[in-house]
Image (cartoon, helix red, strand yellow):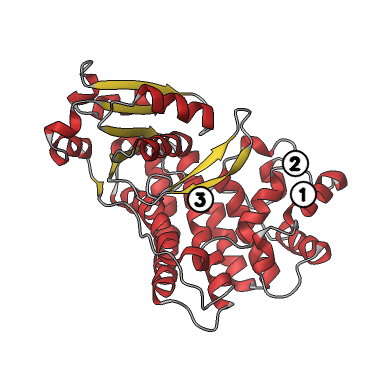
Amino acid sequence: MNESAGIRVQPGAANYFSYEGVLGEIERFFPAERLRQVLWIGGRRALEAAAPYLPALYRDEARSLRRVLSGHCSESVVAGYVAEGAQADLVIGVGGGSVLDTAKAVAHRLQRPFVAVPTIAATCAAWTPLSVWYDDDGRALGYELFPLASQLVLVEPRILAAAPPDYLRAGIGDTLAKWYEARVLCDAESALPLTASIGLSVAAQIRDVLLADGALAVSANADGLVTPALVRVIDAVIAGGGLVGGLGERFTRLAAAHSIHNGLTVVAGTERFLHGAKVAYGILVQLALEKRQDELFNLHGALGALGLPRRLSDLGVDPRDENGIAAFVAHTLRGQESIHFLPGVVDAERLRAALLTVEAMPQR
């Protein structure tokens, strides 16, 4: 990394509200002229879950254009919504990452304010001013960073408490990685921008919240209950996770855990597991690569309490499948992968040794 090069600090959403009844903020926050025509983009299940909490505006046929997304954030989908919503004064996304990324891209093209209403806490997509692009067949193409973030992020805890707990588990796994990966990137620098140092401190605080409250939050989610622990974890995932990257940019982004995730995607059967679940396993492998045995032991136990993967078999991968493991290792070690930010040379021998270390951990 070039420590002399400046970084772009884009902390996140202009306004973040997280409390029961929060969706009323839409009509309280915007003047009437901003609500004459609103484009709503949501997933089918997301809109069904959110409907009891959405304001009267959503049901106003004259003012609301409602569209249901069933695919990914692709050029054809975004272009279609842009054409349909050309007269919209405001764009509101209701759903998970794909929905929010699509709605963000539409709002950017239309140059309209964007409101994010996340219905799961699997990622920080509601907070981050970027969209991940796919082709029409669902293949990832890259991401686009926008100059403006969400005008509003509105988190209704009752919606997220009713969502399947696997999404929250995945969000915890992905957000835990913020600390472990940012530390690698920051440790490599002789001098950090102050904002990156602040981002690293935020990542450590988020890690502590997730480890202290994560299991309680997952339990509450399983029972459909809004509890203080659940709200803290939701805020840590959505707001905290996004804030880390916004403050530190390249100094607080990806290292080995996400490369492990990428490698796993080429192994048949792993597609049924959520992104954050695979990243959580990747943190364990990263710690083994770093030979941080105490941290590996402690996190291994914490992931077990959270119900997150700790072995390849937990992700449907047979460690005895030599062809599958070879493909996994080769993809993880591609030249462009962030695993190579770790100190020293990370080659197939070193990675395989780390995999064996994680496999040998006692299942406590």
Q: Could you tell me how far apart the alpha carbons at marks 1 and 3 are, in whole angstroms?
A: 25 Å
Residue 66 position, x and y percent, is 33, 21
**Earlier-in-chain disc, 3 versus 2:** 2
Establish if 334 lies above or below 101.
below
Residue flagged by tag 1: what amino acid is it? Phe
Establish if 24 lies above or below 254.
above
Quarter in which the C terminus is drawn: bottom right
Q: Nearer the viewer, residue 5 or 203?
A: 5
- Residue placed under numbered mark 1 in the picture: 328
Q: Residue at x 69, y 58 (%)?
A: 336
- Residue placed under numbered mark 2 in the picture: 267
Residue flagged by tag 2: what amino acid is it? Val
Q: Residue at x 69, y 66 (%)?
A: 340
- Residue placed under numbered mark 3 in the picture: 306
Q: In the image, which is nearer the foreground, mark 3 or mark 2?
A: 2
Q: Secondary structure at mark 2?
A: loop
Q: Secondary structure at mark 1?
A: helix
Q: In which quarter of the view is residue 32 placed?
A: top left
Q: Residue furthest bottom?
A: 190
